[in-house]
Image (cartoon, rainbow, N blue to C red):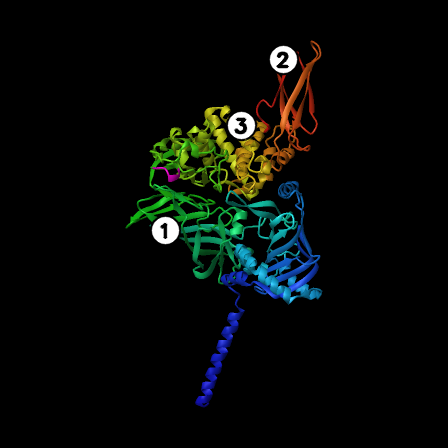
Amino acid sequence: MTARDNYRQVIFLRLTAFASLALALAAQPPSAAELGHAVLTAGLDPSACYRVRDLEISEEDAQFYLTDGYIIFGKPVNGAPVTAVFSAEVEGGDAEVLMLPPNRSERKSLAGYTGSPNLDEHFANAIFLFTEAQARGLLEQIRAKGEAKNSLEVGTLLADQWSPAVSNIAGSYESRMVLDLLSAQAAGSMTREGHANGFFAAIIQGKKLGNFDLGYDGRSYEQLSAGQLATRNGQSYFDTWTSFESKSHRNAPPPEPEEKILSYRMEATLDSSFVLHCVTRIRFQATAESSNVIPFDLSAQMKPTEAKLDGAPAEVYQRDSVRGNLAQNSGNELLLVVPPRPLEPGSEHEVEIHHEGKVVLDAGHQVYFVSSRGTWYPNRGAQFASYDVTYRYPKNLDLVSAGKVVEDRTEDDMRITRHVPDGRIRMLAFNLGVYEKKMLQRGGEQIEVSANREVEDALRYRTQEQFTEPTVGVPGRRPPRVFDGLTHVEPPAPQPAAVNPANQLSNVADDVAAAMEFYRARFGEAPINRLEVSPVPGRFGQGFAGMIYLSTLSYLPVTARPLSLMPPWQQAFYGEFLRAHEVAHQWWGNIVTAGSYRHEWLMEALSNYSALLFLENRHGPKFTDGMLEQYRRALLAKGPDGETAESEGPVIEGRRLENSNNPSAWNAVAYGKGAWIVHMLRRRMGDAQFTKMLAELRRRYEWNTIDTEQFRLLCAEFLPPQAPDPKLENFFDQWVYGTGIPTLKLTYSVKGKPGAWKLSGAVTQTDVPDDFSVTVPVEIQTGRGKVVREIQTGSDPAPFSVPVSAATAKAVLDPGGSVLRR
């Protein structure tokens, strides 16, 4: 072989190698970043614009009928379009969307916003985004039929008009779409009557209802939803008109989490500028859903910088989702970790995620505020897991967190503490400040209460005119958008308040310890045997396993609180009541928990009523009666829309009640009506059986979730024999799944003659629909004692008759306050 031949062979081999490399690179699937970029920049394709007639898009219980108009698709992403725009702005053009909610509660919710129990809206334009398999194949279906007319000219006009809006909307769903595009199931495997585990969102320009959203999400707890962005007083809301399981999911078992989290090992470093730098290592078990991509939730204030899977580099991806945040009201973003190769379902792995952000805020005077307390680290579904966390922070600060301190040392200007909770918990919280502390030992439980030495700025410059009456509800698991009606007005002459919250350490510690003892005696042991209590600015509290946050107001004496002009019950609320409520979350929320937003009311109602039981034990039944009366008033208070808070929706609508119509409705219904529901159940069971029910609730569902139907069946087990409504079906239909507070009126008379007197009466019900019915006790003083009759109300007066011994006999309606009524 000559030198020239040898040279040619070398060149040939190199070219072959380069070609092989190019083919290999071309065969590699696109990264999450590449897919996300493609979703945002695909735009609309003028050459994929068609005049269509009688085109249908079906998303289970929702159908789109594109009667006449143009549809233009986006450029392909990973093989097919993920966006489209339909326009009916042609002569005779029209389109219609139909959606039929499957139950009365959701039909009523929809009617409250749209005036109709079923959605039937004609529209002029709509933006579609999709990864759902049938929608992705729509373009090919149109081309295959050969009936639609391609129109490049109209496509050019529509692309120019709509591409910016499509890109803007796609930015709100980018991570969710990338999750499906990376998933093997979204690549074409079909489930449940032909629907992939995919996503479809329509932003619709309705002719009567204005702009609104309708979506299908196969990964969601409830797949179909419709709602509308709204603004009130400068605050943005997403009003959910309706949300429910699609027909193919309604009888299917609930979905498993995409990955089963087993344990956390974390290192969290707070630098001098209060940026938190974290390395979070999560041991998890892969499922079929997480074989190609592992999803987590992470605070929008935290940004991931890198990830590893079993020590090997892995792609990590997170994008802001403004629209999704408003709809979910969580403040979290979807974070995706892409493994270098698919994971075998059932196999165990460790993912390491580096993330950082400013989640520790300064409220003034060394009072600090840890925002995103539940998702300052990657989480998914708040699963029970073990934790081992090392914190590094400036040594002039004190840090508290759940768990035993197994290491505590100082290096230069940093203090290092390691916390290991003694058991599985759902979420890990921490707090820091310049604290004074008090430690108590009660019945094997170690309680440490921390207090700031000064109050935050927001409480230092307040005068009488600056405070409005607070809402009644206790913001429990998450703080509300607005701190319960606290209105700020600049005072003409600021007067700093000279008060040291630490002076109340003993009172706070004694209340917390007493509540812990009360609950342990009735519900069993707490989730872990050490409880940290720390202050947080604002007017709310939160209860995590082994750690609770209390409003600064709970650390102030009555005379120093800006709310000292308020009624006594509100003083109890920010003092004893808030402390007892958050302590109760050690059981209701951290041992037994709710599976979805639908059942979150149970954790708040049980914690609220446990606090009432504790304080009733301290102060007598009048305390419970007084608080329930205040909750009743709050439920009947009218919001900005002129409707009562209670009428905004049933308790099972959860955070959906925090809407633009009445932002305080969630507090009033979840906490107030929830407490009333539990109270009415207590009256039906009797105190002894009610206490047994709570103990059984903890025993049967510890370290697990409970839903509303399971709670109903459990309560029914503890009703007295021959009780009316023995399965509590009517009770839950009226009070839990429905709305309405009746006005009940008792009328009666005594007629007859000596030895044959008879008291006859009736209970009349108003201010509720005709199908509303409650069981209400009427106590009759017969002269020989008392007789109680259970009267079932209805649209007509409910009569009753009882023999009595004297013409002076009397009847009393609901003497024990066992029914919520006007």
> Which residue bears the numbered disc 1?
269
> Which residue bears the numbered disc 3?
629
Mark positioned earlier in the residue sequence (3 or 2): 3
Left/right placement of residue 521 relative to residue 725 reads left
Mark positioned earlier in the residue sequence (2 or 1): 1
Q: Which label lies toward us, 1 or 3?
A: 3
Q: Which label lies toward us, 3 or 2?
A: 3
Tag on residue 12?
none
Q: Amino acid at mark 3?
A: Glu
Q: Write down the quadrant of residue 352 in the picture.
A: bottom left
Q: Which of the pair 751/364 is nearer the observer?
A: 364
Is residue 345 something one can see in this rendering? no
Region of the chain picked out in magenta, as a range? 454-458
**Within 10 angstroms of label 1, few (less than 14), some, or many (20 or more) residues?**
many
Q: Amino acid at mark 2?
A: Gly
> Which residue bears the numbered disc 2?
783
Q: Is residue 36 above or below residue 568?
A: below
Q: Amino acid at mark 1?
A: Thr
x, y percentage for residue 778? 63, 22
Under tag 1, what secondary structure?
Answer: strand
Could you tell me what secondary structure mostly forms the magenta stretch? loop
Left/right placement of residue 376 relative to residue 243 reads left
